[in-house]
Image (tube, helix red, strand yellow):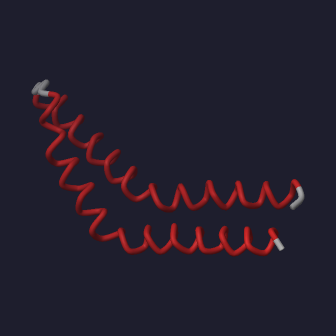
Amino acid sequence: MGLDQFIIVGRETVLVIVLATGPVLVAALAVGVFMGIIQAATSINEQTLAFVPKLLVVIGVFVIAGPFMMSTVTGFFQTVFTEIGRVAR
């Protein structure tokens, strides 16, 4: 296995990580920014106020995007283990 194959696997790994975690992180970021703007506008400085909406949105994103995230990670691992078996021969 050459260096170029390690680079390809590394690039694919980063891509799968971004695809698998991206929806949850973007949703949590959006809700956090929105709640921060609401808190700044109303002068409510309660740190726990943003927790419940963010938690509900993250759970909702997991429910909606969970199958996509799971299939992405599963497909990647199947590819990696297939390549390991091919290289080991």
Residue drawn at (23%, 35%) of the image: 36
Q: Is residue 42 left or right of residue 15?
A: left
Query: Does residue 49 lie above or below 5 as drawn?
Result: above
Query: Does residue 75 lie above or below 8 as drawn?
Result: below
Residue drawn at (27%, 68%) of the image: 63
- Quarter of the image for the C terminus: give it: bottom right
- Quarter of the image for the N terminus: give it: bottom right
Res. 44 image quadrant: top left
Q: Position of residue 75 (x, y in %)?
A: 56, 74
Q: Residue furthest front?
A: 89
Q: Residue furthest right?
A: 2
Total marks shown come to 0
Q: Position of residue 41 (x, y in %)?
A: 16, 31
Question: Observer-nearest residue: 52 or 36?
Answer: 52
Query: Does residue 67 lie above or below 16 as drawn?
Result: below
Question: Observer-nearest residue: 85 or 53?
Answer: 85
Residue drawn at (67%, 61%) of the image: 12
Residue drawn at (14%, 33%) of the image: 48
Question: Observer-nearest residue: 43 or 59?
Answer: 59
Q: Position of residue 69 (x, y in %)?
A: 44, 67
Res. 16 image quadrant: bottom right
Q: Is residue 9 left or right of residue 23?
A: right
Q: Position of residue 59 (x, y in %)?
A: 24, 58
Question: Observer-nearest residue: 79 or 16?
Answer: 79
